[in-house]
Amino acid sequence: MGRLAGISAREVQRVAEREGWTFARQRGSHLIFEKEGTRQRLVIPNKRDLVAVLRLSVDEFLARVNR
């Protein structure tokens, strides 16, 4: 199993918010985030077990989850 196995959508959401993303809306089971100063959007599937990296290395992501 990879080191990101078992990461929940809520944990990814917390890291995204720490990185400056703000919740904009939800469409179905997908949480949509926006970041001020950029036109990019971040879409996080609202699933119980989620493997996602927010443009961070695995080590950076895990360090932020454990804060």
Image: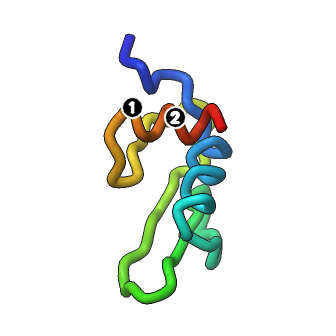
Q: Amino acid at mark 2?
A: Ala
Q: Is residue 20 above or below residue 56?
A: below
Helix, strand or loop for disc 1 = helix
Q: Residues within 10 Å of mark 1 (few under 14, many from 20)?
A: few
Which residue is label 1 attached to? 59
Q: Are marks 1 and 2 in contact (CB under 8 Å)?
A: yes
Residue at 43% from the left image edge and 88% from the top image edge = 37
Q: How is the image coloured?
A: rainbow
Q: Is residue 62 above or below residue 55?
A: above
Mark 1–mark 2 distance (CA, rounded to whole Å): 6 Å
Residue at 64% from the left image edge and 71% from the top image edge = 23
**Disc marking residue 4:** none
Q: Is residue 37 left or right of residue 67?
A: left
Q: Amino acid at mark 1?
A: Asp
Question: Residue 26 or 24: which is nearer the viewer?
Answer: 24
Q: Residues within 10 Å of mark 2 (few under 14, many from 20)?
A: few
Q: Is residue 45 above or below residue 7?
A: below
Q: Is residue 57 left or right of residue 47?
A: left
The N terminus - image quarter: top left
Q: Is residue 40 left or right of residue 12?
A: left
- Quadrant in which residue 64 is drawn: top right
Instruction: Tell which residue pokes out farthest to the top in this image.
Output: 1
Please state the horizontal and vertical placement of residue 6, each as a whole percent of the image.
55, 23
Q: Is residue 3 left or right of residue 34?
A: left
Residue at 52% from the left image edge and 51% from the top image edge = 45
Please state the horizontal and vertical placement of residue 21, each as a whole percent of the image.
55, 69
**Disc marking residue 63:** 2
Helix, strand or loop for disc 2 = helix
Please state the horizontal and vertical placement of residue 54, each as a whole percent of the image.
40, 52
